[in-house]
Amino acid sequence: MSLEEVLVPVEGGVQLHTWIFRPDTGSGPFPAITMAHGFAGLKYRGLRAYAERFAQAGFVVAVHDHRNFALSTGEHRGDIDPWQQIADWRRVISYLESGPDVDSTRIGLWGSSYAGGHALVLAATDRRIKAVVSQVPTISGFEQSLRRVPGEQRPLLEERFNQDERAQLSGEPPATQVLNSLDPKVTAAYRSQAVEDFHDLFPLPDGVEDSHVITLRSTRRAQMYEPGQWIERVSPTPLLMVVGSHDTTTPTDLALAAYERAHEPKQLEIFNGGHYDAYVAEFEQTSAAAESWFSRHLAHA
């Protein structure tokens, strides 16, 4: 397979740094898959192995980093707006389908974690997508926040949100917070050893900025984000959901309940483990299930 690095232009003059993997056999046009990572996730952390597997199976694969992260550009580093990310992803789909070696009638979409929620929204609203894989997806940002933030801390967090809003009205830049910290005195989006362990498995290459600081308003937006509401509208696009049996980051019960609401064609793949096991310990199962799904629904014209 071959790898090309490109900058995909999106709204506002922003450019998304994107890997394009191409099969090394066949003449095309090929079916294609577009991929993205989750909340503050970078493609360097766990996605390359999926992309290479899909390319070896005969797909052109595009993997991008969201605006404001890594080598993608953007005005506010670490700023996460799910609806802007979805709009940007549509532009990546347009870029991918314009490639001379891509069959624009056979495009699939793979999203994980926060982007697993994006995948549901996109599949429900963009019929250019002919098959979708939603891995360990965000279903309800509100419910996740209730479980993650202790009740006594919620008023304090709400006041930080409001202070940030008032400061921005006065011309201040968006306030920031640490992505993950085990120190309760530090304002952080997560408090998880699993996040630290996962990042340690995938050191970043030289020149790539880490994602350890995000804007505070990113957390407020995440609490307002309800991608599971779109799942009934994914059909008739074939949907594969990949869910961990003991996921506390994007809770297992929320994903299973959402899957029950989805219409056919659909398939559920459950792996044994938590959120981050999908990318490492259970990579063979999760990647094989996705490859099989895409091959079943995209490989033949």
Image: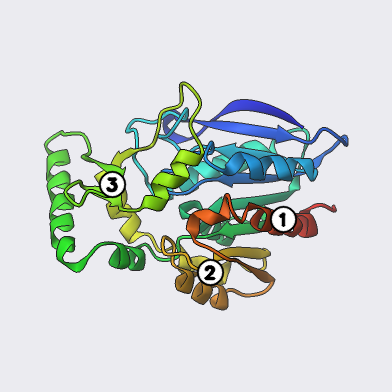
Query: Residue 288: which disc?
Result: 1
Amino acid carrying label 3: it is Ser
Q: Position of residue 119 (x, y in %)?
A: 55, 56
Mark 1 or mark 3: which comes first in sequence?
A: 3
Q: Position of residue 82 (x, y in %)?
A: 41, 50
- Disc 3 from disc 2: Cα separation: 25 Å
- Disc 1 from disc 2: Cα separation: 17 Å
**Tag 2, which secondary structure?**
loop
Query: Residue 245: which disc?
Result: 2
Residue in the foreground of this view, choosing between 56 and 238: 56
Side of 260 where 149 appears, left or right = left
Amino acid carrying label 2: it is Ser
Residue topped by disc 3: 181
* Residue occupying the point 56% across, 73% down: 259
Disc 1 to disc 3: CB gap under 8 Å: no
Label 3, residues with CA under 10 Å away: few <14, some 14-19, many ≥20: some
- Of tags 1 and 3, the one toward the viewer is 3
Disc 3 to disc 2: CB gap under 8 Å: no
Amino acid carrying label 1: it is Ala
Q: Quadrant of the N terminus?
A: top right
User: Looking at the rendering, which quadrant does residue 295 occupy?
Assistant: bottom right
**Tag 3, which secondary structure?**
loop
Report the colour scheme: rainbow
